[in-house]
Amino acid sequence: MENMIALTVDGISVEVPAGTSVLEAARKAGVHIPTLCYLKDINAIGACRMCVVDTGARSLQAACVLPAAPGMVVKTNTPAIRQYRKTLLELVLSAHDKKCLTCVRSQNCELQRLCRELGVEDGDAFKGVTNEYAIDDVSPSIVRDNNKCILCRRCVAVCSSVQKIGVIGPVMRGFKTAIESPWGLKLNEMACINCGQCITACPVGALHEKDDTAKVWAALADPDKHVVVQPAPAVRAALGEEFGIPMGTSVTGKMATALRRLGFDKVFDTDFGADLTIMEEANELIERITSGGVLPMITSCSPGWIKFCETYYPDFIPNLSSCKSPHEMVGAMVKSYYAEKAGIDPKKIVTVSVMPCTAKKFEAARPELGHDGMADVDIVITTRELARMIKEAGINFAMLPDGDFDSLMGESTGAAVIFGATGGVMEAALRTAYETLTGETLADVDFHGVRGTEGIKEATVNINGTDVNVAVCSSTGMAAKLLDSVRAGEKNYTFIEVMACPGGCVNGGGQPIVDSDTRATVDVRAVRAKALYGEDAGKALRKSHENAEIKAIYADYLGKPGGHRSHELLHTHYTRREKYTD
Amino acid sequence: MSEMESKYAELRQIIEAHKDWPGALMPVLQGAQEIFGCVPEDVQKIIAEGLGVTLSEVYGVATFYSQFSLQPKGEYVISVCLGTACYVKGSQMVLDKLSEELGIPVGSTTKDGKFTLQATRCLGACGLAPVMTINGDVYGRLTPDQVPGILAKYRGEA
């Protein structure tokens, strides 16, 4: 039995385990304390002081960093506290650009909401020092606008503590304090992996994705272009949130209809690409195992992880699967297989990927991901950008009927849809590799050992009498930990799945932003993943190699997994990158 | 070993001596400032790699504290106290006079690399207000008209 502590919060008695913060104790008592710099499990530094409470001490104390003590009498709502919080917000506003009308985060901004909830009446109550910052928008993925930054440091915490990268941090002091990269460098001059976790941590509009919707609108309006779209597995698990549909609802059918109504000429599915990836990746794994190739093999679907590996763990480049990521595979097949089948000049095709990910924007621009002078994928937009387009088009998403993807590259199995959750690629690969290696039918396709949101998961799978050790990790911080143990010879794995974002793509940097209050009580990663596992369980086919369109693409065009044409179109290579630019 | 090489060797020694300490960054930055007279980019990278912290963290600390300088400082560093006691006793006028005599704004270094002029927070010598230091030398109860004579000593004119 844990050591329990009894206290009262606004007169309500509550018992919490020792070490619990007053903020969490209040939550347990059903008392809501406003926060701004706090982000559960990521940032609790008592910096913004929005969460101050009265414990009878000589001054108000920040509840997020104050441990609950026995017999503590906490008041969270006194006239002094209310005035204190209001003044704090007015001070924050004195250094904020207050351009809410045109802000990408309007109506989804924690500062804006607190100002309304706490009754701030004058945004110009204090005339303080204001700095004008140039907007850093040269990264292909992430835009930083310090004119909106409130110095909460949530982005800094997720970048340095969770992802173990730390390309931004507070510089200078006092009024000159800013969150920046060292030496005034831009984000793309740093070893940033473009994961966008900083964006989803930001309470305001100081960090957002590079918006590429204008490019998509232009392509759709161009009669000479044939525009082909594909959404990633994780998009369908979260897109509904942008339209008031409860978190964890899969909106696959509505999404397909919405894409068609936006005017795309073909609506294919990255899930098909995921099945294709499994065919190639399972084959590559088997080849590496049977012919003494480099092991452990490590998955290559996550572009944030790939850049992390190239930069911080380049000695593991030979371990990376040579498979392109699923949407890149679909892009390559659209401009070859589909173009040929449909009799369309591939140069007139524009491929658009809808991704839960900001790093995919960087990935699509990699020069090696294309052929004959054409990029496999021309434009990447995030889940948030798609939602923006749907709203701009006046489509009532919640009322849409379910639609289907177009055939040729629209069919998918349950193995593909789980790609969006940490452990999903591993499970999908195991389903196919098991059957290929044993020649037997896998009766129970659920590999529970690789499911769940823990940072690192390990499992041992017996295939043909041989134990195969696998590991799954999510967040680059966890990847670093895992690779360190492999490097030190402490661990011996055959196959490793890495996703750069904690929880995998469902929690990607391009997904709908969930505010800190919700994140304090709901595990977003688990709720969204459940939508994908639910979809998997409901599918008639749950193994990639059973997909009829996959069988057709190999019969008609590719030959066999790992064959010549596959290598030309579906595989890639990696480059060592320097941590510091000169 | 060249002079620069021995400086880098000294830096590595300091990093080695502190690297397992909690809060090692401050003493290492102080050591680096002492060795190089400033903490330029390459030095910060060596510190980051040596201590296993990010360059952002090193740069953040180096820009937070005024004791660290990113650019090389002059042979003589003139620090004029702008603490409350010195300020009310007229240290701003002393500082202005120095700026005029040296022909540089506060916080910069003369072209010949001889002098760096900076304002500091309280030096703790309020009884001598207004006060300034030039390297280790302390000058108290200053008036602007003393400035040219003091500077001449360091220029080698007196």
Image (cartoon, coloured by chain):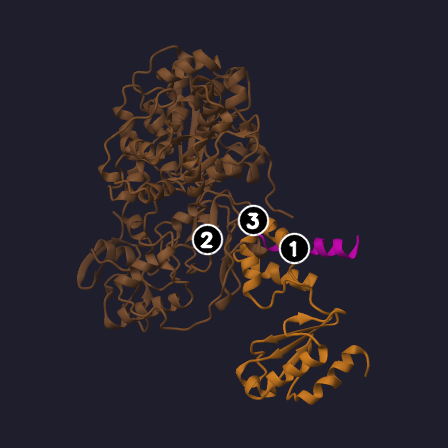
Chain colours: A brown, B orange
- Residue A263 visible in the snapshot: yes
Determine contact: label 1, label 2, CB under 8 Å. Answer: no
A228 and B54: which is toward the camera = A228
Q: Position of residue B88 (x, y in %)?
A: 55, 87
User: Is B2 contained in the magenta span?
Assistant: yes
The residue positioned 54% from the left and 15% from the top of the image is: A564
Q: What is the chief secondary structure element of the magenta stretch?
A: helix
Residue highlighted by disc 3: B52
> Callout 3 environment at 10 Å: few (<14), some (14 to 19), or many (20+)?
few
| Residue bounds of the magenta highlight | B1-19
The residue positioned 33% from the left and 12% from the top of the image is: A441
Q: Are marks 1 and 2 on the same chain?
A: no
Q: Are marks 3 and 1 on the same chain?
A: yes
Q: Distance between the residues labelled 2 and 3?
A: 17 Å
Q: Compared to B155, does A578 lie above or below?
A: above
Q: Position of residue A251 (x, y in %)?
A: 27, 34
Which residue is at the far left?
Answer: A12
The residue positioned 44% from the left and 14% from the top of the image is: A554
Determine contact: label 3, label 1, CB under 8 Å. Answer: no
Dot 3 falls on a residue whose secondary structure is: loop
Residue highlighted by disc 2: A156
> Callout 2 environment at 10 Å: few (<14), some (14 to 19), or many (20+)?
many
Q: Position of residue A217 (x, y in %)?
A: 41, 40
Marked residue nearer the N-terminal end (3 or 1): 1
Q: Which of marks 1 and 2 is in front?
A: 2
Residue type at mark 2 is Val
Q: Where is residue A39 in the image (x, y as percent from the top left)?
A: 36, 53
Residue type at mark 1 is Val
Q: Nearer the viewer, mark 2 or mark 3?
A: 2
Residue highlighted by disc 1: B43
Q: Mark 3 lies on which chain?
A: B
